[in-house]
Image: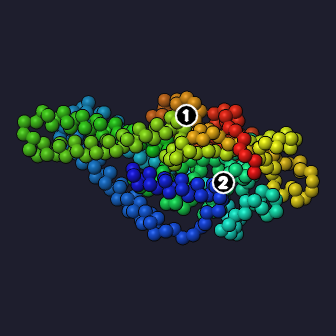
Amino acid sequence: MSQAMEESKQEVNSDATTSSRGTDTASAPPDSLKLHRKINRYAAIFTPFMLVGAVGYATWVVVALLSGITILAIYSILFLAMVLCYARLIWTMFFDNGYVPLEPTNNHVGQYLNRSAIVHGSEKSPEGLDFFTSRPMFECDIDGLPRWCNTCKIWKPDRSHHCSQVGRCVYKMDHFCPWAGGVVCETSFKFFIQFCCYAALYCLFVLIVTAYSFTQLEDRNSFYGRNTAATIGIATVFGLFSGCLGGQSLQFASKNTTTVDNLGHANKIYSFAVRCSVDAAETDVHTTRITYPLDWKLRGNEAPPNAQTFRVWQTPVGYNPYDLGVGLENLKTTMGYSVLDWLLPIRHSPSTAFLKVKDGGEAGAQAMYKTRNAVEAIKPPTTV
Ligand SMILES: [Zn+2]
């Protein structure tokens, strides 16, 4: 867990650099990061074997030594649910990993992105802005441009962060998970929560069954006694670990935040570009405003017909604009709208809807994520 938190801190630091200056350098990773990656790589290889060994041993103890039809039935259900969620989590991390697509045409962009020149239209913008300007609002930097990742060389969509472990920006990144060898993010957060919760329930059940059997044994130093005691220890350790992870993840989901977003949230300020009419923006001198496409001033005094003007607003310090205000509503955006969605690792989170929308269309013109009274709550920043 501490490793995941440390990793997440690195992401936040990386993001802070990118967001405030937009000029983080794409230099070679430092030795500490290389070591981190190496440890995580070995952990990802070793962990499945450790899990299979621990679960296999517990299964042998419960099924072979403590058999009983009720125990076996409950054990089988929890075992199956846990294994299915783990398989779904791994499958998602490999085949639906939530990485933000790259823009190959941006490879020419150098290490320094001249945001000011891009804003004023004197320098051509890297590709990818259409994704943002087709929406009514998007997360941006203080100048009205989206956040920029100088490693991936892309404009960063709302809530995405760069993961240094995999070297890519990831939608709604939570943390890099050495247990599963991938990034817990928008596409996999639900399955990660389900896996942790079922694993905790499985361990709790094994713990109760083995602890009760242990108290009934006459000879606790027998073959049965020693194996039962060992299983109690394993179930306690894994149960506490998965229970804490699952509980914390559920807590984050109930606040519509992530491990990355939660770090330093008390001092965090979000900036949003909110679409407005060109005329309204011209009469409002109190907010930063930006009109796309960015090079229209160079082509004439009149804004082109397809111009989209946005005003930049900022949230109060420590305000989470994605928190819908009601814990259950927040949970539904991750876990789903039905009981089956919550229990079964089949359908993706409703908040992934934007990933299914191809170019254009009414659905594609929505903001990426719901926000709570965002326009009412956020305030204009100092004009730049
Ligand atoms: Zn990136």
- Amino acid type assigned to the residue bearing label 2 in the image: Arg
Q: Residue furthest right?
A: 301
- Amino acid type assigned to the residue bearing label 1 in the image: Asn
Tags 1 and 2 in contact by the CB under 8 Å rule? Answer: no
Determine the secondary structure under disc 1. helix
- Height in image: 89 above or below 206? below
The residue at 22%/35% (across/down) is: 209
Q: CA distance from mark 1 to mark 2?
A: 25 Å
Pointer 2 local density, CA inside 10 Å: few below 14, some 14–19, many at least 20: many
Q: Position of residue 76 (x, y in %)?
A: 32, 38
Q: Classify residue 227 as left or right of residue 162.
A: left
Q: Classify residue 352 as left or right of residue 384.
A: left
Q: Residue furthest left?
A: 219
Q: Quadrant of residue 312?
A: top right
Pointer 1 local density, CA inside 10 Å: few below 14, some 14–19, many at least 20: many
Of the pair 164 and 177, the residue shown nearer to us: 164
Q: Earlier in the sequence, mark 1 or mark 2?
A: 2
Q: Classify residue 161 as left or right of residue 194.
A: right
- Which numbered circle lies on residue 147? 2
Of the pair 203 and 286, the residue shown nearer to us: 286
The residue at 29%/33% (across/down) is: 73
- Which numbered circle lies on residue 230? none
The residue at 24%/34% (across/down) is: 208
Of the pair 296 and 86, the residue shown nearer to us: 296
Determine the secondary structure under disc 2. strand
Q: Position of residue 147 (x, y in %)?
A: 66, 54
Q: Classify residue 181 as left or right of residue 110.
A: left
- Which numbered circle lies on residue 330? 1
Q: Quadrant of residue 237?
A: top left
